Image (spheres, grey):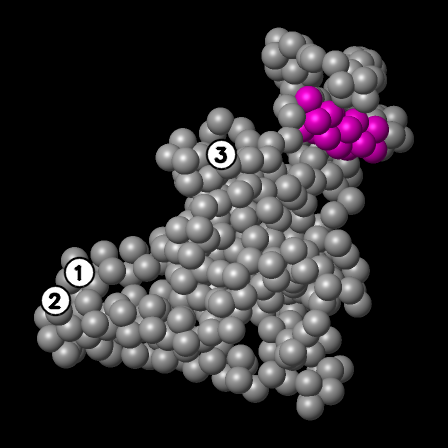
């Protein structure tokens, strides 16, 4: 796909930075550690700046600015804009514009800026090599009224260099002189930028390739608990594409979503407000709808192949019974949601249990018969 793009469309500045920062980190960090070693300060500084810049992307760039999933006070907006610039993923205005375009045209080869249909590498970072400026997309006119957003949009690289490279190097110098300053520049600066960037990139590539789709299989977006660990909760991508304006990505009690917890905490401190939430009824309805789709496909395949493996007839009867039961639950919940009726927690728990039983049965079915896997 990249070979088909005209040579004169290459963004040489961005491409050079992405390549050189990666190579410099890969070579420079090991050489530094070999000569000077690494101490608690360097590790702590890396983790702190990884957290500050990574969280500024997820909480600020993504959920606050791109999706307006909540409102935030000026100090929160300023903080996320400053440390978001440290990730060198463009200004919040440009980032939000690209991301809104992605959601509007997901999986459309021409209109989705980082469509997975163009290949894993393109979705991961290839698209950035050919991202030219200036762009005048009208989908961020609401953000143009924010003076802090426009201030950062004017100086993203300057802010990024000062706060992402100079500041950690200065802290390193205060800690242990010039050698520690060099280490902080390489580890908390360059290596940290590379790590944060690729964590973000993996949401666009890996989370559109590997994982589960419990809410909507019509999109390539997938849930990945592994990526959620490294991206402060962004890995639950199928949910996010199904309910993009929810301030949460991980809605289950066991799901790892530090960004959600941070936003909730900011609300309690009076620094955030108007947190947008999707009702549990709509979430369960999406799960039931998707489970019905999967169950219907498996039931049809089972009826065609039930004689090819043991327990075929019994499994077919069990799956048919659960499928009919799920259909009744779905119809009941769909009617309740359309009429905006309150549904009891017990009913929602029961319907989710029905869906889980069907999926567990289908999993067992796939293990019994490779033809259905």
Q: Main secondary structure of the magenta part?
A: helix
Q: Nearer the viewer, mark 2 or mark 1?
A: 2
Q: Which residue is under mark 1?
A: 41
Looking at the image, is 238 positioned above or below residue 32?
above
Secondary element under disc 3, as helix, strand or loop, is loop
Distance from the alpha carbon under mark 1 to that under mark 3: 31 Å
- In the displayed structure image, the side of residue 174 where residue 320 appears, left or right: right
Query: Which region is colored magenta?
Result: 281-297
Looking at the image, is 67 positioned above or below residue 46?
above
Residue 286 sits inside the magenta stretch: yes
Secondary element under disc 1, as helix, strand or loop, is helix
Give whichever of discs 1 and 3 has the lower sequence position: 1
Q: Which residue is under mark 2?
A: 175
Q: 366 or 38: nearer the eye?
A: 38
- Do tag 2 and tag 1 residues touch (Cβ < 8 Å)? yes
Looking at the image, is 277 positioned above or below residue 143?
above
């Amino acid at each position: 796909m990249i070979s088909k793009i005209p040579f004169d469309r290459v963004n040489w500045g961005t491409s050079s930075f992405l390549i050189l920062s990666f190579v410099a980190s890969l070579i420079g960090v090991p050489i530094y550690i070999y000569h000077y070693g690494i101490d608690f300060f360097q590790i702590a500084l890396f983790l702190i700046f990884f957290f500050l810049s990574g969280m500024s992307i997820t909480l600020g760039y993504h959920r606050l600015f791109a999706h307006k999933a909540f409102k935030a006070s000026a100090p929160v907006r300023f903080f996320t804009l400053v440390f978001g610039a440290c990730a060198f993923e463009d200004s919040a205005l440009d980032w939000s514009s690209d991301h809104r375009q992605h959601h509007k045209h997901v999986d459309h080869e021409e209109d989705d800026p980082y469509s997975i249909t163009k290949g894993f590498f393109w979705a991961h970072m290839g698209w950035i090599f050919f991202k030219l400026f200036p762009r005048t997309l009208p989908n961020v006119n609401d953000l143009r009224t924010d003076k802090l957003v426009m201030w950062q949009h004017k100086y993203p690289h300057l802010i990024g260099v000062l706060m992402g490279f100079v500041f950690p190097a200065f802290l390193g110098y205060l800690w242990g002189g010039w050698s520690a300053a060099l280490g902080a520049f390489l580890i908390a600066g360059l290596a940290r930028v590379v790590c944060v960037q690729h964590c973000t990139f993996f949401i666009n590539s890996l989370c559109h390739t590997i994982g589960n789709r419990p809410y909507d299989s019509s999109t390539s977006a997938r849930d990945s608990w592994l990526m959620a660990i490294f991206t402060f909760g962004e890995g639950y991508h199928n949910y996010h594409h199904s309910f993009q304006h929810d301030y949460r990505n991980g809605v289950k009690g066991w799901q790892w979503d530090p960004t959600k917890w941070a936003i909730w905490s900011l609300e309690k401190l009076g620094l955030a407000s108007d947190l947008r939430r999707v009702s549990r009824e709509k979430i369960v309805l999406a799960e039931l709808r998707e489970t019905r789709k999967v169950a219907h496909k498996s039931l049809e395949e089972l009826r065609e192949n039930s004689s090819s493996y043991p327990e075929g007839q019994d499994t077919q009867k069990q799956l048919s019974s659960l499928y009919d039961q799920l259909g009744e639950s779905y119809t009941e919940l769909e009617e309740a949601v359309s009429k905006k009726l309150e549904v009891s927690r017990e009913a929602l728990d029961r319907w989710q249990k029905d869906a889980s039983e069907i999926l567990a049965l289908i999993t067992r079915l796939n293990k019994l018969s490779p033809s259905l896997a």
